[in-house]
Image (tube, rainbow, N blue to C red):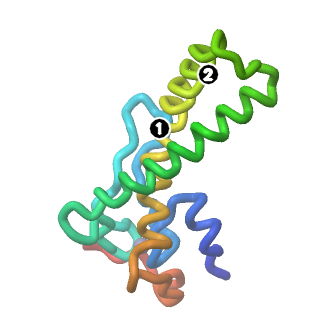
Amino acid sequence: MKPISKLQAVIECKCPRCRKGPMFSGSAYSFKGQVTNEYCAHCNLRFEREPGFFYVAMFISYAMNVAEMIAISVAAYVLGVALTYENLWVYVTIIIAGVFVFAPINYRYSRVFLLHWLTPGLGFIPALWEKQTVKP
Ligand SMILES: [Zn+2]
């Protein structure tokens, strides 16, 4: 069987090394909350590469937040919310609501982007795709 593409692995939040094991338990919007798995269930890769590794994801999440706030503002303007002083609170409310709606997605994908694209020396190993699940 052919391995999935890197883009598909990112979208599905799969392990960057084997592209099979899920990085998270639970869906992004579940009431139980999402948890980053400590190890890949397939290849046993430790996702938190070193202590404090995911602090970097905070900066990625910040950049995603800014991009989303700008996109939400532009979308509100395009959808007819006039850009006047009286509508300032409308914009602020829409932007803050958007930040809360996108927060679980930012949490998840900032970590995925960090592991897949910004971690040197962590690449896909095709042999792990075909290999059976490694039990720790
Ligand atoms: Zn893996």
Q: Are marks 1 and 2 in contact (CB under 8 Å)?
A: no
Q: Which residue is mark 2?
A: 91
| Residue closest to the far bottom | 127
- Give the camera-side residue of 75 and 128: 75
| Residue closest to the far top | 86
Question: Residue 63 at x, y = what percent?
Answer: 49, 51
Q: Earlier in the sequence, mark 1 or mark 2?
A: 2
Q: Residue at x 63, y 68 (%)?
A: 7
Res 1 seen here: no
Front disc: 1 or 2: 2
Whole-number angstrom distance, CA of label 1 to CA of label 2: 18 Å
Q: On the picture, is 1 further left or further right than 108?
A: right
Instruction: Report the disc number at residue 131.
Output: none
Q: Which residue is mark 1?
A: 103
Res 60 seen here: yes
Q: On the picture, is 42 further left or further right than 93?
A: left
